Image: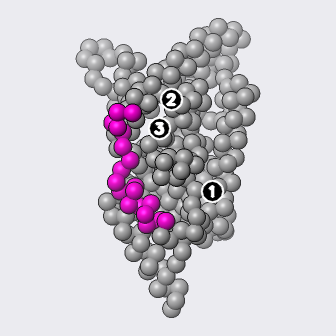
Amino acid sequence: MKLGKTAILFGTGAVEYSWNPILKAVTPFCKWPKAKPEATIDVANTFFAFIVYQLRMAAKTPSKKDLDKLLEAYKKFKLSMCKEISFSMKANEILIRTEFIEMMKLLKKYSTEYCALTTNWDTVIDGIFENNVIHLHGIFSNPNALYFPTEIIDEPYRSSEEYENYLVSHGRALASLSEADSLVIYGLSLSPLDTELSTLLIECLNGKNIRYIFIVDPDHDNVSKRMQFYIQTPNSAAKMYGVLPNSINQIEEQILLNDQLLKQ
């Protein structure tokens, strides 16, 4: 059995210590009443969602002074975070997981071709794909284009240029996913914080192209349940498998098993 054209959609779980530079950037903005512990991933996501909410509210007010002030702070924070990501990459403080490398060796063996998409802001993994990766949420080298959790393309505080650029990026992603025969989701929780990405997946998964879906994640049961929610039409013939990152060989075992079944 061949996987055909495989789309690999990966998140922070594919990069070891990927959240460290982000948490370093967020921590100074967390005004704790007494002790000042480092921000957690959950606190960081809460912080991002709060920023987005404030921007949306400010964009609705007649006066643009508050919005301009918030946008300026928003840009400064994104620049600060991108500097932390850049420093961590140069210092090799964030690294591609060896399990991801092993998985790619396997996928190259069974895929006719593949494409890569990510929600990550760093480029630690991009070299594996000859830097041909679609960054759905922006990239650290372009701070102004970063996409925060809960944000969508058509935000009221975006410029028309930003809107068009995001539209092009998501259009490329939709085209790549729509052409894929198999989908591998690695280290990405499909969190409700990113409903827009989930909607993008719905458009692709409810077609007839994708035959196999592999969810590679320590919590693949919950991610699979979310994915199952998105597969809502009888048109989808996709078979879904959950795989632990340290058991990548299960992908090959499933491929070989399906191959045997097809020959019977």
- Mark nearest the camera among 3 and 1 is 3
How far is the residue under mark 2 from the one under mark 1?
27 Å
Residue 118 lies in magenta, yes or no?
no
Rendered image: mark on residue 49: 2
Secondary structure state at the residue bearing disc 2 = helix
Coordinates of residue 109 in the picture (x, y in percent)? 47, 70
Report how many numbered discs are placed on residues in the image: 3
Coordinates of residue 155 in the picture (x, y in percent)? 66, 29
First in sequence, mark 2 or 1: give its number. Answer: 2
Secondary structure state at the residue bearing disc 3 = loop
Q: Amino acid at mark 3?
A: Asp
- 35 to the left or right of 119: left
The residue that label 3 is drawn on is: 122
Name the outermost residue toward the bottom: 264
How far is the residue under mark 3 from the one under mark 1?
21 Å
Density class for disc 3 (Cα within 10 Å; few <14, some 14-19, many ≥20) is many
Span of residues in magenta: 90-108
Q: Amino acid at mark 2?
A: Ala
First in sequence, mark 2 or 3: give its number. Answer: 2
The residue that label 1 is drawn on is: 177
Foreground residue among 219 and 262? 262
